[in-house]
Amino acid sequence: MIDAAVLPTGFEPLEVFVDKWALATSFERSRERETSSLAQMREFYDAFAPYLNDALAYLDRKGLAEFTPADERLMALCLSLAHVTLAVEVQGEAEAQNALLRHEMRITRSTAERAA
Amino acid sequence: MNVEAAKFRPVSNEQVAVLGTQPIPVGPYHDPDYFALEREAVFKRAWLHIGHVSELPEPGSFIVRKVEAARASILIVRGKDDVIRAFYNVCTHRGTELVAQSDGLASAFSCRYHMWTFNDHGELRGAPDFERFFLDKADCGLSKVAVDVAAGLIFINLTPDPEQTLSEFLSPLETQLEQLPCATATTFAEYLYEIDANWKLVYDNFQENYHLRFIHPRSVGTTATGPENPFGYATGFDFVGLHRKQALWMNPEHQPGPVQVSALERLVNDAMFGGYEELLANSEYFAVFPNFFMLNSPILPFSHTVFPIGPEKSRGVIRFYWRGEDDSATQRFAREYAVAATRDVHAEDRGVIEAGQRGISSGAIQHIHFQAQEALCRHFINSVDATVQAYKAEKSLGGFGA
């Protein structure tokens, strides 16, 4: 029952973030950042950032066309971290105020949603 | 590189004084009458950026784009012969908008009202019960719109016979634009915004760095400001006819965070691999008249077009041009980051621009002011106003007749 795994082997500690952060589109990821507290994002960042380079290396070896559902979820977590890192590494305490401003900037197309 | 060579030197007040030093009247930034003149003088005459060749990937590909400033909907088609043509998206029977979709693949376009059907050359090929009209089909083709491509970017011109070709209009910037990622891009990412502000007020925000440290203390922060250049002023301006450029200063001491580094390393590697080593070292921002920007950066290869909707309403469209769809997880992550990071900056701008419009529209002040480091804003209003005044002069001469 390999397909039943939520995330690929080795990334099990990150499963708790899948429901919130493994989202299908760039638009949804940007919206999730807007509606999350800085504390929620720090929690995700602190847990996931140490795994990022390993996760990308694993997914690079797989190749985008060969992803299982578990791989797709791991990829989506990496992509959410691309947004969340801006809140944690850059905006900090200004995040809440700037989230209001970002709401009007709608992501309408992303290469992450296109076939490789 | 020695320390002496890297030292920042701003453009001097004297270098830009030629553009004038007077306060700028606020009328052009909110007056509906001025906007009406701009529709005719600027947006129905200048070459306008409208799309990218990757939106028309194969024969039969089409896009439909609104140009509110000209009250027009434009149909752009790649024909079976691979030639890109543009037409007003208007059925020649009784003027109904022809195509409702925003893009797609088609060999013919049928008006839903009475089923007049046009081919990829805009010719009327079929119309039910046509014998009852008093017309030749050959006289019923779609109204043509001039269209051309430079650096992969599609431009249209709503003058029936444009005075200048696109190359003449862009000269000498075209050869520089051809070196940028957009020229060979095959795909793009996009975000957009609507804003309650005049298109020039929106555009001006992106032509000056004076506001960076106040509006973007974190999102721009030390990437483009630093102790030797606290305002992040440009290292040079270039005024090229109606167009203009600025060379951007980047702070070599900037230290991104660890996850940012993971994304940036991949973006830099892709830029080097793509042959953009030279562009990496020289950051330039192109402002193409009237409403188009292009950053030359191969790391953040975005354009920004400000479409006027009304005297106090505009739409901004930002596009990131990439060569090839994502080839790997790391590239996908890096591109997601590039878009998200730039969006943060633009979001901060949007809020303060609307505040500027409210103040101007209140009538509280009659003039605004541009300092020397806002010279691109001054060159821009000079360019727009010269175009508007030339149009007015032409119309008033025409009115009296010869």
Image (cartoon, grey):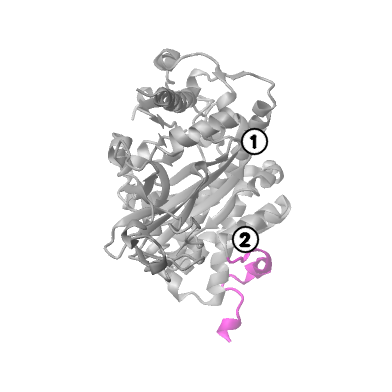
Magenta extent: A1-24
- Chain ID at mark 1: B
In the image, residue B396 lies at what x, y percent? 44, 23
- In this rendering, does residue B6 appear at all? no
Residue B229 at x, y = what percent?
50, 25
Say left or right for A11 vs B234.
Answer: right
Q: Quadrant of the C terminus of chain B?
A: top left
Is residue B18 shown above or below B155?
above
Q: Amino acid at mark 1?
A: Glu
Above or below A113: residue B388: above
Pointer 2 chain: A
Residue that badge 2 annotates: A28
Query: Helix, strand, or loop for circle 2?
Result: helix
Identify the image quadrant of residue B48. Answer: top left
Q: Residue furthest bottom?
A: A1
SS under mark 1: helix
The lab-note entry on whether marks 1 and 2 share a chain reads no
Q: Position of residue A37 (x, y in %)?
A: 73, 52
| Residue B319 painted magenta | no
Local crowd size for mark 2, using a 10 Å CA cut-off: few (<14), some (14–19), many (≥20): some
Residue closest to the eye, B114 or B323: B114
Asked whether A70 or B24 is in front, the reply is: B24
Q: Nearer the viewer, residue B214 or B328?
A: B214
State the residue position of label 1: B354
